[in-house]
Amino acid sequence: MGDMGKRSTGVKVLVWFAAALVLMTAGCKKKEAPSAERVINVQTLAAEQKSFRPLVEAVGTLKPDQEVIASSQVEGLLKQVRVDEGTPVSRGMVLASVDDTDYRLEVRRAEAALKQTEATLANTKVEYQRKNELFKEQLVTQQQYDDVTTRMALADAEVDRAKAALDLAKERFAKTKIYSPLQGYVKEKKVSAGDYVRNGTPLFSLIKVDPIKLLFTVTEKDVGKLKVGQQVQFKVDSMPGKEFTARVSIVYPSLEERTRTLQVEAQASNRGGQLKPGLFSRVILYTEEARMMMVVPITSILYDSESTKIFIVEGDRAKERKVKLGGKYGEWIEVVEGLKAGETVVVVGQNNLAEGVKVHVAR
């Protein structure tokens, strides 16, 4: 009986201890505080309509209006070079000259040959006139008359041949001087005085820079907005704050398949020569008159593989909106679909948001 009593008492103690442990655990659970909902800090801006003029933005490069190679058309020793790189030139200006000694002598020989043939022709004409009168009176034979007639025709042909030879000699002599075919600048001098040149040897690279060409490309979606004669504005980094005007002169007939872009050429006045070929340019081409449009800051737009979206705030919750975009206007971008005026757009902190997340709008 003593052992049984002790065992019964031990069991009661264990049961009491387990019950107490359960009650303590339950009590601790009741005292734990519920987890707080996460709140994301954001900055917002009310969506509104602004007046902008629809445009296409592009980048381009300035090119010479013309670029030609001035070459020698005769061979000989280059006697004189009158220009260097960067020298301004006018149309018809002498750039260089080849030693003309041989060519001047050739002209003199041709002149002498012409005088000789002309004298022969004159003598033959006198003889022909005399024999023509005698032939009418039947005092010379038919053969004698035919002979003088033939010699006169040959003498006349020799005069024509001598004149052609003289013209050719004069032309070759004139080509000993190399003239500029345009008004512009010397881009590159390829020879120096004392060089021996041949027919076709390149001497100078010349460029015409007034007007100057502006070459730029536009994306496939903007091709329909282009037309010849359209005015464009552009800026160059070397002259910040200054804007230049050009007009579209050529719209190329086909797109570049790899980049899906179309090349466009415009011409700009460059009388002062400020614009230099090779300068990088930022181009703006206005396609319509100014109109009211819904815009948001570009920084508020989120992109993924399938859609473009923004977040707006309703009450204290973030709401995701898929939007369709239009053109860019500096720091703003047009929203064509998906947004109404007055709605509160998240412009800072949107990268941390998801649908329905609680937000706190920073003031």
Image (cartoon, grey):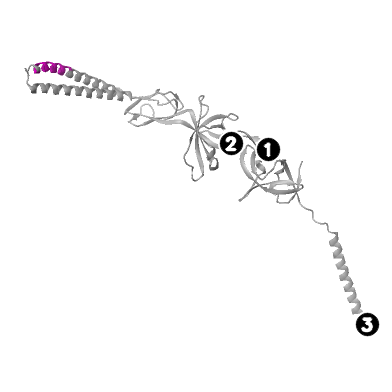
Q: Nearer the viewer, residue 71 or 100?
A: 71
Q: Give the quadrant of residue 53.
A: top right
- Callout 2: few (<14), some (14-19), or many (20+) C-alpha neighbours within 10 Å? many
What's the CA distance linking mark 3 and mark 1?
A: 96 Å
Q: Is residue 228 above or below residue 11?
A: above
Point out the frontmost of discs 3 and 1. 1
Residue 49: give its label.
1
- Residue corresponding to mark 3: 2
Ranked by sequence position, the earlier of labels 3 and 1 is 3
User: Going 16% across and 17% down the picture, which residue do you hit?
Assistant: 125
Q: Are marks 3 and 1 in contact (CB under 8 Å)?
A: no
Magenta stretch, residue numbers: 122-135
- Residue corresponding to mark 2: 55
Point out the frontmost of discs 2 and 3. 2
Q: Nearer the viewer, residue 111 or 49?
A: 49
Residue 80 in sight here: no
Residue 361, given in percent of the width and then of the height, sits at: 76, 44
Q: Secondary structure at mark 2?
A: strand
Q: Amino acid at mark 1?
A: Gln
Relative side of 229 to 339, left or right: left
Q: Is residue 183 magenta?
A: no
